[in-house]
Image: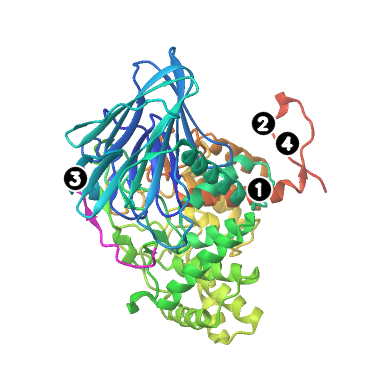
Amino acid sequence: MDEYPLISEHGLIGDLQTAALVSTEATIDWFCSPRYDSPSIFGALLDREKGGYCKISPRVQTYTKRQHYSPDTCVLVTRFLTEQGVGAVIDFMPPALTGKPTKNHRLVRLVRCARGDMTFNIEIAPGFDYARQPHEVTATAEGWEFVSGDERLAVHVVDSLGDQCVSEGRIRGGVLELTARLRAGSATGVLLETDPDGPPRVVPPEECDRLLEDTVSFWHGWLAHSRYKGRWREIVNRSAMTLKLMTYAPSGAMIAAPTTSLPEQIGGERNWDYRYAWIRDTTLSLHALLGMGFTEEAAAFTDWVGNRVREQAGGGEHPLKVMYRVDGSGNLSEETLDHWEGYRASAPVRIGNGAADQLQLDIYGSVLDCLQHADQRGLQTSYANWQALTRMVDWVCDNWEQREAGIWETRGGDKDFTYGRVATWIALDRAIRMASARGRPAELGRWIGHRNAVYSQVMEHGWNRERAAFTQSLGSDVLDSSLLVMPAVGFIAPNDPRWISTMDAIKKDLVSDNLVYRYDPAASPDGLRGSEGTFSACTFWYVESLALAGRLREARLVFDRMLTYANHLGLYSEEIGLTGDQLGNFPQALTHLAIINAALTLDAHLDDVAMPIIPRSSLFPGPYWVSAR
């Protein structure tokens, strides 16, 4: 590994229990097994020397590369075009459809030549347990095997219809080196398998064809359940498939991202482990999944959330943790990997996440909004869940005035965050609705009283008269883009004068070239050094807020412009830097959830208007959306 690729120069493949990142150079530089939150086997993305990788590259100095997904699938194709020939590396992971956790995962890497003659170098250099454990590699009769303690990684060679395409491997310094020589129409490859049932073997071409066909059929069949027929079908469908890739099938939990410690600022310390399931994401995920028609995934995630509520995680001072591992366990102790240099020297590299034990009051609003939304649409809450929910709501009534860490998980001290109060109102309001709609037992008088008190507090103390805006915390003058969700959750009317002036203030202070910052760290210190880019999910929340306020021309402009910041595959990391580079963990579920919800909202409002045919020269400035009514 000579250098670090851009974060955006990656595609994602996975089997619904773990995932891998593949660069535009056809290098797998991130892969954890057996789960998303397990130690890495390939980790060169965070340390190019020690991390481990699997690279397939043409043996020429000059070539053009192109990378794309096979249509409507998560099969990734990296093409190399040279004067001598054209070849492709096809990467995919057959979905693990057992419904149970497994240690056995397969990474299939097919190499094909479409024109001329091509020679590819294949290098496999794992780094087990975040490169903390040594390994041995041995040759067998039909392949090779890496062994590190109880961990095994088999390298199966894909047969090539009788042609001897792959040379005998060389083992140097724990690295397996192979050479594949291909002519037009021929193909070969390797199948990497964790925890294999037997020794490495030669894989017949028809077996690989079947695996590829089954994988394509799975994704086509899954996407066929989508009801989305709107204007942005390609990016919405890609977002949905990306979210599916980040959903742990045995439990239904959706991770925030498949990576850890990709920096929010190159060379900075804002590096976090996102390979866990955030309770907060439930709100966006349920609306997005049900809005697109994916009821099975919505039901699985609802069950997962309900299980966490019933467990009253740990019986500690808070009914819920901020985040969990994909199996529902809550041990996320944070540590640093000091032997790794970090992506482009962005240290520290962290595993685990200390924010799991913070008090963040907004998660209770996320849970109740999620379950009430599902309850309305036929995924009714069970009696056991309702009993647990009433205890949780009673806790919220007793504790909603506490200071907390907030939605952005700052480490600069607890505050009376306005968004936390708004989310507390959501929790109480949705609980009241669930009780009233189904005749469930509840202390409605008490809940209503606290709901009204929270509402009044936000309106009186979360509003800053001088700024003419709702602010980050009670009594402050700092703006925060998390408040962009206020009209979407029903806390305030989208055309309320207070809300219109809040949006204008956010636009002035936190919007740059239509991209939205979370907040200004200089105005509101968060306990960390450095700065960060614009937060992609906030930009899509801004789109939704503009649409709800009837500012459709502006909403569509921001949405379409933001789409230009996607990578070549339609994927987004957490943030966008000043030069347009993607920053932070990649891809980020929150951003892709926000894309879907923004598209659903914007589509619904655009369907109520008509766009007349007008000359191109008159499109700007001035409105071009004219009401059809």
Which residue corresponds to mark 2? 621
Disc 1 or 4, which lies upstream in sequence?
Answer: 1
Which residue corresponds to mark 1? 602
Q: Nearer the viewer, mark 4 or mark 2?
A: 4
Q: Nearer the viewer, mark 2 or mark 3?
A: 3
Q: Nearer the viewer, mark 4 or mark 3?
A: 3
Q: CA distance from mark 2 to mark 3?
A: 63 Å
Disc 2 or 3, which lies upstream in sequence?
Answer: 3
In the foreground, 217 or 308:
217
How many numbered marks does the figure carry?
4
Which residue corresponds to mark 3? 135
Which residue corresponds to mark 4? 624
Which amino acid type is shown beneath numbered disc 3? His
Which amino acid type is shown beneath numbered disc 1? Leu
Disc 4 or 3, which lies upstream in sequence?
Answer: 3
Residue 374 figure quarter: bottom right
Which residue is pictured at 29% across the width and 37% down the height?
53
The answer to whether one can see residue 484 in this image is yes
360 part of magenta stretch: no
Which amino acid type is shown beneath numbered disc 4? Tyr
Contact flag, marks 2 and 3 (Cβ < 8 Å): no
Part of the protein shown in magenta: 327-341
Which amino acid type is shown beneath numbered disc 2? Pro
- Image-based side of 476 in relation to 345, left or right: right
Disc 1 or 2, which lies upstream in sequence?
Answer: 1
- Image-based side of 610 in relation to 3, left or right: right
The outermost residue toward the right is 629
